[in-house]
């Protein structure tokens, strides 16, 4: 049996009534530029977590790591044979807000998934950059910079200042401004 295409499975799940917004590297690729990504990140309503796990379980995936707001599942028969899926669990209000502002994106073979608005994706990336490990790794920072450039976001404007105040830090802001200069 061929290994499943994790992103195509996610699109199929939404056709079964499960809700998701594709986030992470795949969403960045659909918005800004192409870069390698080694998982499929989905923002899902926390009340649907067990339904998502059951769906992926029927396709051979099992939980590898779990925290209260994050679940990673991977293909059990061949973990390297398919991309792992990361489920980021959001409360109903947060998920609804992000989903309402999201857009449908073609992911290939006639399949679509919702992707967050550029500002919501930047907010998620800024939040991730609060982790010293993620900031040192640099991928999220480059994602933010490319998203800002592609969407022509005014980093001196009030909207960006509010994003930085809520999700970023002074260090992150300085690094972004420095990279964009």
Image (cartoon, grey):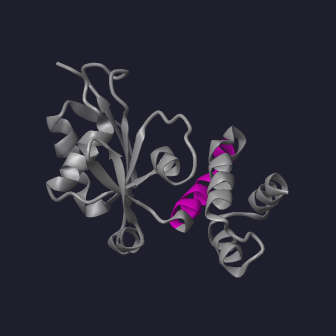
Which quadrant would the C terminus be assigned to in this image?
bottom right
Residues rendered magenta in the picture: 120-134
> Can you see residue 151?
yes
In the orientation shown, which residue stands out farthest toward the front?
Answer: 110
Q: Position of residue 53 (x, y in %)?
A: 23, 45
The residue depicted at 42 percent of the width and 72 percent of the height is 101
Q: Position of residue 117 (x, y in %)?
A: 48, 66
Q: Position of residue 107 (x, y in %)?
A: 35, 46
Q: Position of residue 100 (x, y in %)?
A: 37, 73
The residue depicted at 79 percent of the width and 58 percent of the height is 171
Vertical side of 35 occupied by 170: above or below: below
Picture quadrant where residue 133 is located:
top right
Vertical side of 138 occupied by 112: above or below: below
Which quadrant would the N terminus be assigned to in this image?
top left
Taking the magenta stretch, the answer to whether it contains residue 129 is yes
Horizontal relation, residue 102 to residue 158: left or right: left
Horizontal relation, residue 65 to residue 139: left or right: left
The residue depicted at 25 percent of the width and 24 percent of the height is 3
> Can you see residue 130?
no
Horizontal relation, residue 85 to residue 14: left or right: right
The residue depicted at 56 percent of the width and 38 percent of the height is 35
Vertical side of 164 occupied by 111: above or below: above
Taking the magenta stretch, the answer to whether it contains residue 158 is no
* Number of numbered tags placed on the structure image: 0
Picture quadrant where residue 18 is located:
bottom left
In the orientation shown, which residue stands out farthest toward the bottom?
Answer: 158
Our reading of the magenta stretch's main secondary structure is helix
Picture quadrant where residue 64 is located:
top left
């Amino acid at each position: 049996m061929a290994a499943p295409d994790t992103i195509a499975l996610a699109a199929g799940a939404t056709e079964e009534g499960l809700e998701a917004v594709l986030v992470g590297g795949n969403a960045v690729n659909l918005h800004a530029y192409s870069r390698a990504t080694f998982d499929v990140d989905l923002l899902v309503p926390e009340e649907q977590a067990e339904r998502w796990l059951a769906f992926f379980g029927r396709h051979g995936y099992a939980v590898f790591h779990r925290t209260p707001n994050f679940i990673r599942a991977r293909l059990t028969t061949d973990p390297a044979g398919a991309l792992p899926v990361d489920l980021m669990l959001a409360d109903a209000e947060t998920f609804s807000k992000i989903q309402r502002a999201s857009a449908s994106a073609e992911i290939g073979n006639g399949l679509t998934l919702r992707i967050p608005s550029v500002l919501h994706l930047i907010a998620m990336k800024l939040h991730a950059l609060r982790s010293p490990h993620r900031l040192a790794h640099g991928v999220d920072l480059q994602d933010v910079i490319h998203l800002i450039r592609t969407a022509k976001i005014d980093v001196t404007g009030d909207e960006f200042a509010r994003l930085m105040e809520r999700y970023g830090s002074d260090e992150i802001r300085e690094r972004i401004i420095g990279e964009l200069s």
